[in-house]
C-alpha cells in the first residue's frame, strides 16, 4: 500500500471547499454522476474508433444508499482508471483545480452568484463525506486500484480485487450531511439534476406488473417482477431531430418536464443550431396570466443533458423568460459569476438567435393559420407586447403579426387597422387617432357613443399596454392612441366643425360658478362644451396623458417620476346645448338647483363606475325621493 500527500499549498483545502460551497452541498451528486457519464461516453468513443478493445454493451450508472453503514455508492461501467491515471487525475488535476477555483472566487463570496460549479467535479464529494474511496479498473489490461482519502491532504493507494471494468465511488457520509442517506432525498436530487442524462441511471428496483398468462382466472393476481428502476430518460425530445417528432411527442415531453402542470401548452418552438454555437432545446408558450411576476423561471438550462439552473436571465431575452421548456448548450460559460455571463459574446448571440426563432415561429403560425392564432392571441399577447417593448429587432418582426382586437371581437394587424380607420379617424392635424377601451363593461357608455360616430374601438387590456402605445406613437408617424373615456366623443378626434353654444358666455360663467360651488370638494375640472343636444348633459372623462403616465409608472418604468401615487384626475364636461343644463341654469331656487346638479353629476359618475359606498347609497335614496 502506498500513501502520499496531495500536492496543494492550501494545507486544509477541504474545510474551505465545504465552507465555500455550503449553500449548494447537494450538487456533489450531480458532479459525481456527470463524471460517471463522461467516463462512460469516453469509453463509447474509444470503442467506436477501435482504441478500447472492449465490448461497449449497454452500460448504466448505479446509485446505492447504504443507510446502516452511512455510505453512498456510485458505480459506472465506463473507461476506468489505471494507478497512474488515479495519481494524475485525482491527486494532481482535481486538487490543483480546486485550489485555483477557490483562489479565484473566495473573495467574491456568496454574492458572486456562481452558476453551475462545473469543473468542481470529483472533490465536491468532500462537501458531504468525511472519507471518500475510489475503486476503479481500467479498460486497459492493468490491475484495479483502490484509492482512499479522509479529507486531509493524505491519501492511500493500493491494489484492488475489482474484476469488472469501471469505477465505484464510496462516500462515507459526514455527520452534518445525514440527509443524503434518505432514499427520498437522493431520488429528489437525481430527478432534479439527472432526469435527462444520456446514460441510464439505476436507483434501486421497482415492481412491474406483467400481462396475465392465457387461461388465467379473473381473480388470479397478475404476475409481477422486480426490474431496475431507471430514473432518467436518456433520450429526451430536445436531443432528437424535429422531423422525428410528432405533435404528441412534444406534448408528452411537456408533461415530463412539468408533471404538475395540467394545462396543455399552446404551441412549441424547437431550437436546433450547431453554428456559430451549439444549442438545442424546446420552448413552449404556456397560457399566460396577466400577473407577470409569477411566470418567471420556468425554462430549464442544461449543459449536455445535465441540469444547471432555471435562472436563464441573460441567456434568454427577458420577455421570453415567461415561456417554459429546455435549452441545452455546451457553449454557455457556467463556472463564472452572472455579470460575466451576460457580457459573454456567445451568450449575446444565443439570446438574439432565440429571439429570431420565436419571431419566425410566430410569423409562420400567423400566416399558416390566422384563425387559430387569433384564438390564442389573448393567451400570448403579454409576451409579444413585452418583446415589442424591449427588443427592437423583435418589434420590427412582430409589427407584421401583432394583433389589435376590437371591442366587437375583430382582429387587425396594425396595417389593416390603419387602412380601415384612416378615412374616419384622422383629425384636423392629419393625425391617425386610434380609439381603445380597457374594459368593455366599465366603459360601455363611452364605447357606444363612439360607435354611433362610426368609430372603430380596440380592446386593449393587458397590463403593459400603456407602455406599448407610447412605443408605437414614437416609432410610427402621426399616430395617437386615445381611450374612449379620455374626452367627450366630439373631442376624441378633433375635426374642424365645432357646434354653436345655445348659452351666452355670461350664462356659461354663471353656470360654471353654480357648478363649482356644488362639486368643489370632488376634485373635477369643469369644462363647458357645445355639443349635440342628444349627447349626455354631464360626462366625466379622464385625460389620456396623465392617466397613461400614471399607469406606466405603476407597471414599472416610463411615466413621469412620482406619478404612480398621484390621485386620478377627472374632467367634468358639461354639454351647454342640453335642455337639462338650461333647466339647471334657469332654476329659481338654489336648493332645487343643487339637487339637479348632484343628481346629474352622480349619474355621470355612475356611468364611469365612480359612484361607490356612502355616495351611492345617498344617490339611490335621493332618486327614490325624486320619483315619489
Image (cartoon, grey):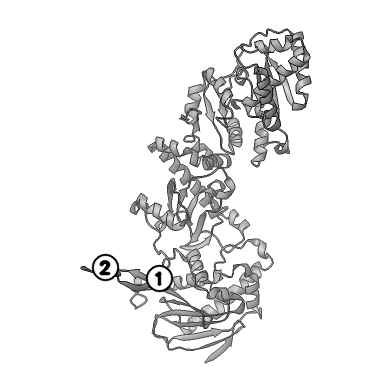
Mark 2, other Cα within 10 Å: few <14 / some 14–19 / many ≥20: some
Q: Is residue 110 left or right of residue 458?
A: right
Res 395 visible: yes
| Secondary structure at numbered mark 1 | strand
Can you give x and y, in whole percent of width and height, for residue 195 in the image?
45, 64
At 65% from the left edge and 36% from the top edge, which residue is drawn?
A: 551
125 in relation to 294, above or below: below
Q: Is residue 628 above or below residue 125?
A: above
Residue found 61% across the figure and 79% down from its top? 175
Drawn side of residue 205 relative to residue 445, left or right: left
Q: Check residue 304 in the rendering and tell me which mark sits there, or answer none.
A: none
Mark number displayed over residue 212: 2
35 relative to 374, above or below: below
Q: Kindly give the residue lying farthest to the left in the view shown.
A: 215
Q: Which mark is residue 229?
A: 1
Measured as percent of width and height from the top left, residue 104 is found at: 65, 68
Amino acid at each position: 500500500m502506498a500513501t502520499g500527500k496531495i500536492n496543494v499549498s492550501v494545507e486544509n483545502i477541504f474545510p474551505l471547499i465545504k465552507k465555500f460551497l455550503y449553500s449548494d452541498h447537494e450538487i456533489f451528486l450531480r458532479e459525481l454522476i456527470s463524471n460517471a457519464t463522461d467516463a462512460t461516453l469516453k469509453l463509447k468513443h474509444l470503442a467506436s474508433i477501435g482504441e478500447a478493445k472492449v465490448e461497449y454493451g449497454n452500460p448504466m450508472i448505479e446509485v446505492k444508499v447504504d443507510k446502516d453503514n452511512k455510505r453512498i455508492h456510485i458505480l459506472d461501467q465506463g473507461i476506468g482508471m489505471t494507478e497512474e491515471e488515479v495519481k494524475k487525475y485525482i491527486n494532481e488535476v482535481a486538487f490543483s483545480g480546486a485550489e485555483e477555483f477557490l483562489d479565484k472566487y473566495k473573495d467574491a463570496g456568496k454574492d458572486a452568484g456562481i452558476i453551475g460549479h462545473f469543473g468542481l467535479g470529483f472533490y465536491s464529494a468532500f462537501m458531504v463525506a468525511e472519507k471518500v474511496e475510489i475503486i476503479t479498473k481500467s479498460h486497459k489490461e492493468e490491475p484495479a486500484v483502490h484509492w482512499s482519502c479522509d479529507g486531509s491532504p493524505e491519501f492511500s493507494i493500493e491494489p484492488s480485487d475489482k474484476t469488472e471494468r469501471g469505477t465505484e465511488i464510496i462516500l462515507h457520509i459526514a455527520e452534518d450531511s445525514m440527509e443524503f442517506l434518505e432514499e427520498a432525498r437522493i431520488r429528489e436530487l437525481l430527478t432534479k439534476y439527472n432526469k435527462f442524462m444520456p446514460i441510464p441511471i439505476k436507483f434501486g428496483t421497482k415492481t412491474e406488473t406483467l400481462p396475465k398468462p392465457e387461461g388465467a382466472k379473473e381473480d388470479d393476481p397478475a404476475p409481477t417482477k422486480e426490474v431496475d428502476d431507471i430514473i432518467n430518460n436518456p433520450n429526451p425530445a430536445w436531443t432528437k431531430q424535429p422531423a422525428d417528432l410528432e405533435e404528441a411527442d412534444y406534448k408528452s415531453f411537456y408533461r415530463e418536464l412539468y408533471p404538475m402542470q395540467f394545462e396543455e401548452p399552446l404551441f412549441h418552438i424547437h431550437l436546433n443550431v450547431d453554428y456559430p454555437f451549439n444549442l438545442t432545446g424546446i420552448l413552449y408558450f404556456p397560457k399566460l396570466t396577466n400577473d407577470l411576476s409569477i411566470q418567471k423561471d420556468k425554462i430549464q438550462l442544461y449543459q449536455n443533458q445535465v441540469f444547471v439552473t432555471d435562472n436563464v436571465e441573460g441567456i434568454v431575452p427577458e420577455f421570453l423568460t415567461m415561456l417554459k421548456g429546455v435549452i441545452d448548450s455546451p457553449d454557455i460559460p457556467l463556472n463564472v459569476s452572472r455579470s460575466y455571463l451576460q457580457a459573454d459574446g456567445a451568450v449575446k448571440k444565443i439570446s438574439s438567435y432565440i429571439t429570431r426563432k420565436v419571431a419566425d415561429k410566430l410569423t409562420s403560425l400567423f400566416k399558416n393559420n390566422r384563425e387559430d392564432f387569433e384564438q390564442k392571441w389573448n393567451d400570448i399577447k403579454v409576451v409579444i407586447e413585452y418583446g415589442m417593448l424591449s427588443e427592437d429587432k423583435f418589434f420590427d418582426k412582430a409589427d407584421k403579426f401583432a394583433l389589435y382586437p376590437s371591442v366587437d371581437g375583430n382582429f387587425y394587424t396594425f396595417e389593416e387597422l390603419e387602412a380601415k380607420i384612416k378615412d374616419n379617424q384622422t383629425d384636423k392635424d392629419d393625425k391617425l387617432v386610434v380609439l381603445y377601451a380597457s374594459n368593455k363593461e366599465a366603459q360601455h357608455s363611452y364605447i357606444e357613443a363612439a360607435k354611433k360616430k362610426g368609430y372603430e374601438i380596440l380592446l386593449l387590456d393587458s397590463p403593459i399596454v400603456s407602455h406599448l402605445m407610447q412605443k408605437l406613437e414614437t416609432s410610427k408617424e402621426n399616430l395617437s392612441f386615445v381611450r374612449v373615456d379620455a374626452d367627450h366623443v366630439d373631442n376624441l378626434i378633433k375635426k374642424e366643425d365645432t357646434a354653436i353654444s345655445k348659452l351666452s358666455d355670461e350664462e356659461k360663467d354663471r353656470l360654471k360658478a353654480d357648478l363649482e360651488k356644488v362639486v368643489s370638494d370632488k376634485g373635477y375640472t369643469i369644462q363647458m362644451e357645445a355639443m349635440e343636444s342628444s349627447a349626455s348633459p354631464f360626462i366625466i372623462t379622464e385625460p389620456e396623458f396623465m392617466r397613461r403616465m400614471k399607469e406606466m409608472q405603476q407597471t414599472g418604468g416610463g411615466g413621469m417620476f412620482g406619478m404612480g401615487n398621484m390621485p386620478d384626475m377627472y374632467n367634468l364636461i358639461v354639454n351647454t346645448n342640453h335642455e337639462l343644463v338650461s333647466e339647471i341654469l334657469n332654476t329659481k331656487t338654489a336648493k332645487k338647483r343643487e339637487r339637479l346638479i348632484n343628481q346629474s353629476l352622480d349619474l355621470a359618475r355612475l356611468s364611469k363606475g365612480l359612484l361607490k359606498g356612502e355616495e351611492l347609497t345617498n344617490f339611490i335614496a335621493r332618486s327614490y325621493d325624486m320619483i315619489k
